[in-house]
Image: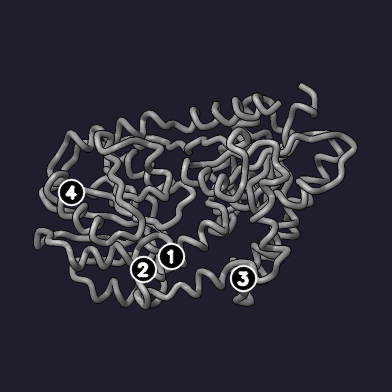
Amino acid sequence: MTSREQYVCAFRGRRDYYHVPLALAEGDLLDQFITDTYGTPALRALAEHVSSQQLDRVVLRHEPGIPDERVRCLWGVAARERMRTAARISPNLTWLQYDHYFSEAAAERAQQSGANLLLYSPYAWEAFVAKYRHQPRRVLFQYHPHPDTEVRLLLEDAGRHPGAVDISGELDARPPIEPLVRRERDCWQHADLVICSSAFTRRSLLEAGCPEERCVTIPYGVDLPAVDAETTSDRFRVLFVGAGSRRKGLGHLLYAWQQASLPGDSRLTLVCRNLEPNLAELAAATPGVELVRGVSPERLSGLYASATLFAMPSLAEGFGLVYLEALAYGCPVLATSNTGAPDLGAEADGVFITPPGDRDALVAALERLADQLTGSRDVRRAARATAERHPWARFRADIRSAVSVAA
C-alpha cells in the first residue's frame, strides 16, 4: 500500500484507548501515529527491571496492534507540559497552548511521506491549513460537540436555573484568544470528511454549517467484562462517574435526587476525581449521597456491577464512553438527548433518555426507574445485550470503511 493511501494520526494521551490509530494499523492504513508519552520498546524493557509507578503508567500507554516503528513520541512537549503542571499552571490552559505541536508534527510527516490526515479536532488546524506538494485527504474526528453549541447550551441552562451552579469556571476555561478559538471552531471547514462520535455531535457540526454529506456518525465501542450481568439488588443504587461539573448535569442530578420520592435506603454514589466546590457542597447537603474522589479499576468494576442504574444527565456530551461501560456490566443508563446514549438504543435496550436540564423529567425518571429496575434481571440482560452490539472491532471497521469511502 502506498503512502498516499495511508494516514497520519495525532493526539495526546490514551485517547479512546488508541482504537482510531489501531483501526488504521489493522488495515495497513497507518503511516504514523504521533502522541506524547507512549510505552516504547525501550521503556517496556526498562519496566521489566525497574519498579516505578510513574514508569508503569507510561508503559500502559501501549497498543500491541500498532507497530512500534510507526509511533512517534513528542517527548519534549510532554516534558514541558509536566513542568507546567508542577508549576500549578492549569492543565487545560497548557493543552490549549500546546495542541498545535501535535498538529504541526502531523503536517510535517504528511509533507514528508505524502500521506493523508486523520486528526482529532484539537490537533487538526495547523495540519489542515498547511501547504503540501500533494493533495492529502483531510479527515477530522470530532469527539466532542462544536464549541459554539456547547457554550450556547451552558448559557441557556444557566438562564433557566440562575444562581443554581456557577458556570463561569467552565466558560473561562475556554481559549482566551481568537486564534485558539478558531482552531476548534473552524477546522471542520478544511475537512473532506468529519467523523462524529454521536448523532448529537453531528447535529452540532451541522448547526455550525457543515454540509450533511460531509459528516458521518460512528459511535464508540466497548470491551465486555467477564461478569454476571444478571446480579440484582433489592435496593435502588445509582452511580455517577465523571467530572464533577455542570456540563455533566451533576447539579441537576443532585437537585432531582433531593426532590424525588425514593425508597429510604436509596443511594447515589458519585465517582469524581475533581468536583466543583459548589457541587461538593450540594452533594454533602444531599441525603443518601456518597462521594468517592478516586477508585481503582477493580472497585469501579464492582460499582458498575452492583448499581441499579447509571445516571449522567449531561447538558452537552460528545458521546460518553461511561454509558457503554455501564451497559457492558448489565447496568441500564439514564442520559439526555445531548449525548451518545440515544445512538445505543431505547428503553427496551436499557437506555433511558430525559431532556437536558429538565429537573422535573429527571425526578419523574428516577422515581419510575426506582420501581421498574430494582431487582429486574430482564433489563440487565437487555443492557448487556446492547453493549454486545457495540464492540470496539465494529467501531474500527466503521472507521476503515469511512476513510475508504473518503478515498
Residue denoted by label 3: 85
Residue denoted by label 2: 160
* SS category of the residue bearing label 3: helix
Q: Which residue, as the protein is rendered here, is positioned at the far top?
A: 1
Residue 117 seen anywhere in this rendered image of the structure:
yes
- Give amino acid for label 2: Arg
Could you tell which of marks 1 and 3 lies nearer the N-terminus?
3
Residue denoted by label 4: 369
Distance from disc 4 to disc 1, alpha carbons, whole Å, reads 28 Å
Residue denoted by label 1: 156
Disc 1 residue crowd, few under 14, some 14–19, many 20+, Cα 10 Å: few
**Quarter occupied by residue 176:** bottom right
Q: How many marks?
A: 4
* SS category of the residue bearing label 4: helix
Quadrant for the N terminus in the image: top right
Could you tell which of marks 4 and 1 lies nearer the N-terminus?
1
**Residue 58 in the figure: left or right of residue 294:** right
Dot 1 and dot 3 residues touching (CB under 8 Å): no
**Residue 245 in the figure: left or right of residue 23:** left
Which residue is rendered at x = 78% and y = 51% of the image? 104
The answer to whether 69 is drawn above or below residue 170 in the figure is above
User: Of the residues tagged 3 and 2, which is closer to the observer?
Assistant: 2
Residue 56 seen anywhere in this rendered image of the structure:
no
Which residue is rendered at x = 11% and y = 48% of the image? 371
